[in-house]
Image (cartoon, helix red, strand yellow):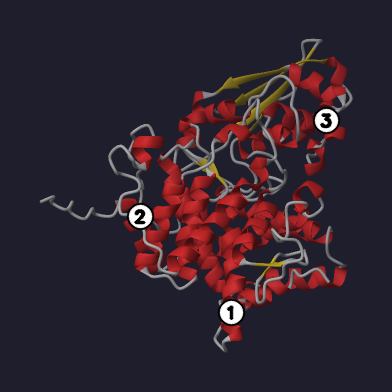
């Protein structure tokens, strides 16, 4: 008689995430306040992306003309979709221009990518409840889901580097979205745990589309795909689909053995609200975050060098190890996705124009030969102290320094910027600029009256958190 194998204990990470989503009360006022700004900043990034046909061509129902009753509304568009496709659309808009928030650790990522799934499900669930005469979700609940999604993605990223094994960070988006939206859909412990097991079994995309020779626009919709898949798995689990106990640790067949070089995944600290409190806003420039301080430094140097471009002999960029590994690029850059992840290109634009905008990555701007001439004069070196402080959880710096050396032997000041605008240490300085960025992004799609209404409600925290989630989404329906 064959002895049945004893039931396996569920992987500890799945248990810890499930318990956190279900039972942890978020009490940090700073986390909620930051989540408020993340919400509006993230939506603003999505609205700005609607100006780019390469983004909008991907939006809408899979079958043209499909409208889902009480479905997810996609801000700034006429689309009314099922929540899975709605999550893709919102997620793709959010990430398209590389302008939403950032988290840097052993793994990198953009925790507000999870808003694609969270907002899609909040709108869908709210309308479903209203149709049954029940109370909809509130924006307060949306903020709580955002805080928890940020925390799950960010704490996983602290010590578990996917990029070092060739996998992409959007796996952690899928994990975080799956966990929080399963609860939003009414799931309990079993459903969240089951859904999470599927999210890990799904695995992740390869990072190859972020690196030469394959750099391309998939990086702009990959997170939308991940958050959308999280919603799909959550909906399946809530319907009763079974899960699996050890998708991470199963010998020979689990994620750790097959895809993580036999390393153990860890949660290096308890899940609370640390990530939301420390998240990085992209306030000034749409560029990969490891280059944000280089962008600030180069813009600061613009007045000094703008009339001496032909006199430049060398440009030195002093940076940290992660920037060298990810965005130090020489040679041809083939598309906007390649350019906004190149520290030399970003620095060249800052020196040349005194500003950096999303359109600066387009082909017509990149055709200016002076950009590549400046890139060719750049020398990248690592400052070990910058690398150390980048990894220090009490600092979380993203330091860069830029200096321009001229042919006559003179040089500009070495402009060093340790903490970018948008860092927790510069939050007060950043908030007015976040609101300005939001207003400017809205102005690209909405008439003044509607824009002012959106801004007035969005900036009033107490009004916002008590608002029904569906009513909040309705503000963004482009009339």
Secondary structure category for the residue under label 1? helix
Q: Quadrant of the C terminus?
A: bottom right
What is the CA distance from the residue labelled 2 to the residue labelled 3?
Answer: 46 Å
Binning the other alpha carbons within 10 Å of mark 2 as few (below 14), some (14 to 19) or many (20 upward) gives many
Task: Write the residue at 77% across / 14% down.
Answer: 410
Q: Earlier in the sequence, mark 2 or mark 3?
A: 2
Q: Indicate the position of residue 163 as horizontal and vertical percent values.
A: 50, 34
Q: Indicate the position of residue 50 as horizontal and vertical percent values.
A: 78, 55
Secondary structure category for the residue under label 2? helix
- Position of 468 with respect to 259 (left or right) is right
- Residue that mark 1 sits on: 128
Label of residue 366 in the image: 3
What is the CA distance from the residue labelled 2 to the residue labelled 1?
Answer: 29 Å
Binning the other alpha carbons within 10 Å of mark 1 as few (below 14), some (14 to 19) or many (20 upward) gives some
- Position of 425 with respect to 2 (left or right) is right
Residue 28 versus residue 330 in the image, above or below:
below
Foreground disc of the pair 2, 1: 1
Residue closest to the far bottom: 133
Q: Indicate the position of residue 11 as horizontal and vertical percent values.
A: 30, 51
- Position of 319 with respect to 264 (left or right) is right
- Residue that mark 2 sits on: 14
What is the CA distance from the residue labelled 3 to the residue labelled 1?
Answer: 48 Å
Task: Write the residue at 67% across / 76% down.
Answer: 69
Foreground disc of the pair 2, 3: 2
Q: Quadrant of residue 271?
A: bottom left
Q: Indicate the position of residue 390 as horizontal and vertical percent values.
A: 50, 35
Q: Is residue 55 visible?
A: yes
Q: Is residue 23 visible?
A: no
Q: Nearer the viewer, residue 417 or 213?
A: 213
């Amino acid at each position: 008689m064959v002895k049945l194998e004893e039931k396996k204990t569920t992987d500890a990470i799945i248990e810890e995430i499930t318990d956190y989503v279900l039972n942890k009360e978020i009490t940090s006022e700073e986390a909620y306040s930051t989540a408020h700004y993340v919400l509006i900043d993230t939506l603003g990034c999505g609205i700005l992306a609607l100006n780019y046909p390469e983004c909008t061509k991907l939006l809408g129902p899979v079958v043209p003309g499909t409208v889902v009753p009480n479905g997810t509304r996609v801000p700034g568009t006429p689309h009314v979709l099922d929540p899975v496709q709605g999550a893709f659309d919102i997620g793709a808009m959010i990430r398209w221009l590389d302008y939403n928030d950032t988290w840097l650790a052993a793994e990198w990522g953009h925790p507000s990518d999870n808003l694609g799934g969270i907002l899609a499900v909040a709108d869908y669930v709210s309308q479903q409840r209203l149709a049954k005469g029940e109370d909809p979700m509130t924006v307060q609940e949306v903020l709580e889901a955002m805080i928890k999604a940020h925390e799950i993605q960010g704490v996983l990223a602290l010590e578990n580097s996917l990029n070092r094994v060739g996998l992409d960070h959007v796996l952690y988006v899928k994990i975080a979205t799956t966990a929080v939206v399963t609860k939003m859909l009414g799931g309990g412990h079993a459903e969240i745990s089951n859904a999470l097991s599927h999210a890990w079994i799904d695995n992740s995309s390869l990072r190859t589309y972020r690196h030469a020779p394959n750099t391309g626009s998939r990086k702009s919709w990959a997170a939308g795909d991940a958050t959308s898949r999280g919603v799909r798995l959550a909906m399946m689990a809530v319907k009763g689909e079974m899960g699996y106990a050890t998708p991470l640790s199963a010998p020979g067949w689990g994620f750790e053995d097959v895809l993580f070089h036999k390393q153990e995944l860890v949660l290096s600290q308890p899940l609370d609200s640390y990530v939301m409190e420390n998240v990085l806003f992209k306030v000034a420039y749409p560029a990969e975050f490891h280059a944000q301080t280089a962008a600030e430094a180069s813009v600061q140097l613009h007045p000094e060098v703008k009339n001496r471009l032909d006199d430049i002999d060398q440009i030195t960029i002093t940076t940290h190890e992660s920037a060298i590994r990810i965005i130090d690029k020489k040679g041809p850059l083939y598309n906007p996705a390649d350019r906004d992840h190149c520290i030399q290109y970003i620095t060249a634009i800052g020196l040349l124009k005194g500003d950096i905008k999303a359109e600066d990555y387009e082909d017509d701007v990149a055709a200016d030969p002076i950009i590549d001439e400046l890139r060719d004069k750049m020398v990248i070196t690592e400052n070990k102290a910058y690398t150390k402080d980048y990894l220090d959880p009490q600092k979380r710096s993203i330091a860069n320094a830029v200096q321009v050396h001229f042919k006559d032997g003179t040089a500009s000041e070495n402009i060093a910027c340790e903490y970018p605008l948008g860092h927790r240490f510069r939050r007060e300085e950043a908030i007015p600029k976040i609101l300005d960025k939001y207003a400017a992004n809205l102005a690209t799609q909405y008439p003044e009256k509607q824009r002012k209404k959106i801004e007035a409600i969005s900036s009033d925290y107490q009004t916002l958190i008590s608002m029904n989630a569906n009513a909040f989404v309705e503000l963004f329906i482009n009339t």
